[in-house]
């Protein structure tokens, strides 16, 4: 019969043994040193100068002094002497100065954190992953950086996302308080789209880039083209709003046909233009003038124009074009007047148009 246990080599109390407490206490000493094993260090090759009772170390390679020949063994300071504890396969030890957990594999102490993570079903960082989100992270910052040439890399960094077919969705979902506010990606096609939402259910496309030709579309861009369907009479030297009361198109309802003016839905830079055709009243000497007016009172710089003609042998027309920086809610209207004699701005040929460009 063996006089020690198989795994921890704890001494047995033998039959008819004198001073049985000595063997029992020896076994307790070994258990106290091995159970819940935690060592101060794993790199030292010589015993420290003033150890405290119960201090434990994993002895480093090529050890000397009292630890000579104890490489990779556990050294326990107890009762004023070093006790050697040879490790067995499967022993685990917490390394206090490194905050890492090691396991003995039969020949060396190795880290319990695997060097490669493969085919994991769930991975949660700071939170719990689930079937809907098999990779989940609750963090405040993340960094992806390229492996440099000096480190054996290329210096490049690509992040690849792939979907099965063109009709599937692929993209980034941007949320506030778990309510989706924006989507960026390939949704239902291979055209890249940016869509935004106020409530997470109704979405508006901000831009779409056609992958077949690179053409960029802004479906929600404010733009309009309006015209008058009646002859607008205007007196001499009297600036009058032209009755642009119909639209050929009016994206986002930017033009208010009831009030004959454009209303900026958002702040930005806008391009405006107008075409005005003269229609004679009683005199052929009238001079036609026109301008664009901000908020009903301020002439937009660069929008004023004037023209005169015989008005008999030719059609007399005036073209305006300018840009303006507007705040949300600003209005722009087309005004006209005549010098020398009154007249009309002709129906169907007098138009006003504009679009947001920046």
Image (tube, rainbow, N blue to C red):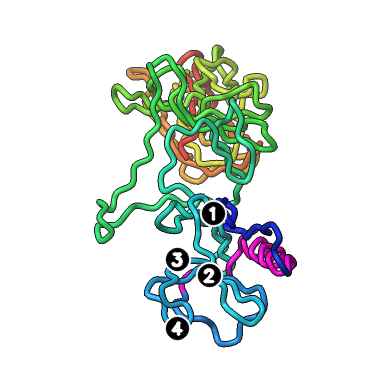
Please state which of residues 286 and 326 is positioned toward the viewer in this rendering.
Answer: 326
Residue underneath mark 1: 91
Q: Quick one: label 4 or label 3, which is nearer the N terminus?
A: 4
Q: Which residues are magenta?
A: 19-43
In the image, taking residue 342 as reference, residue 212 lies left or right, namely left
The residue nearer to you, when weighing 185 against 17, is 17
The answer to whether mark 2 and mark 1 are in CB contact below 8 A is no
State the image coordinates of residue 174 (x, y, percent, origin top left). 57, 35
Q: Which mark is residue 84?
A: 2
Q: Is residue 170 visible?
A: yes
**Tags 3 and 1 touching, CB below 8 Å:** no
Q: Where in the figure is residue 346, as x and y percent of width and height?
A: 49, 17
Q: CA distance from mark 3 to mark 2?
A: 10 Å
> How far, Cα to Cα, is label 4 from label 2?
13 Å
Q: Which residue is mark 4?
A: 65
Residue 270 percent coordinates (x, y): 50, 37
Q: Residue at x 50, y 41 (%)?
A: 269
């Amino acid at each position: 019969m063996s006089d020690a246990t198989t795994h921890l080599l704890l001494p047995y109390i033998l039959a008819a043994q004198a001073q049985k407490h000595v063997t029992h206490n020896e076994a307790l000493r070994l258990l106290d040193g091995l159970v819940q094993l935690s060592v101060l260090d794993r790199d030292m090759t010589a015993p420290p100068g003033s150890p405290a009772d119960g201090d434990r170390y994993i002895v480093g390679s090529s050890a000397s002094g009292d630890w000579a020949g104890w490489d990779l063994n556990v050294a326990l300071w107890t009762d004023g002497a070093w006790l050697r504890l040879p490790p067995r396969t499967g022993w685990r030890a917490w390394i206090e100065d490194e905050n890492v957990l090691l396991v003995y594999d039969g020949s060396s102490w190795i880290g319990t954190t695997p060097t490669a993570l493969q085919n994991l079903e769930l991975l949660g960082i700071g939170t719990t992953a689930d079937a809907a989100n098999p990779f989940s992270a609750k963090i405040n910052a993340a960094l992806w950086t390229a492996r440099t040439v000096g480190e054996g890399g290329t210096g490049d960094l690509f992040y690849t996302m792939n979907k099965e077919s063109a009709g599937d969705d692929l993209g980034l979902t941007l949320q506030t308080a778990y309510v989706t506010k924006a989507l960026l990606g390939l949704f239902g096609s291979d055209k890249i789209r940016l869509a935004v939402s106020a409530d997470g259910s109704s979405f508006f496309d901000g831009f779409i880039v056609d992958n077949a030709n690179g053409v960029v579309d802004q479906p929600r861009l404010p733009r309009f083209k309006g015209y008058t369907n009646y002859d607008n009479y205007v007196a001499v030297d009297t600036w009058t709003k032209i009755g642009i009361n119909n639209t050929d198109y009016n994206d986002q309802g930017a033009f208010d046909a009831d009030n004959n003016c454009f209303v900026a839905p958002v702040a930005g830079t806008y391009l405006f233009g107008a075409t005005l055709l003269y229609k004679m009243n009683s005199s052929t000497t009238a001079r036609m003038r026109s301008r664009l007016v901000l908020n009903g009172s301020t002439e937009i710089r660069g929008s004023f124009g004037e023209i005169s003609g015989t008005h008999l042998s030719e059609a007399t027309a005036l073209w305006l074009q300018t840009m303006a920086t507007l705040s949300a809610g600003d209005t722009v209207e087309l005004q006209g007047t005549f010098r020398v004699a009154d007249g009309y701005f002709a129906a169907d040929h007098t138009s006003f148009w504009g679009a947001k460009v920046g």
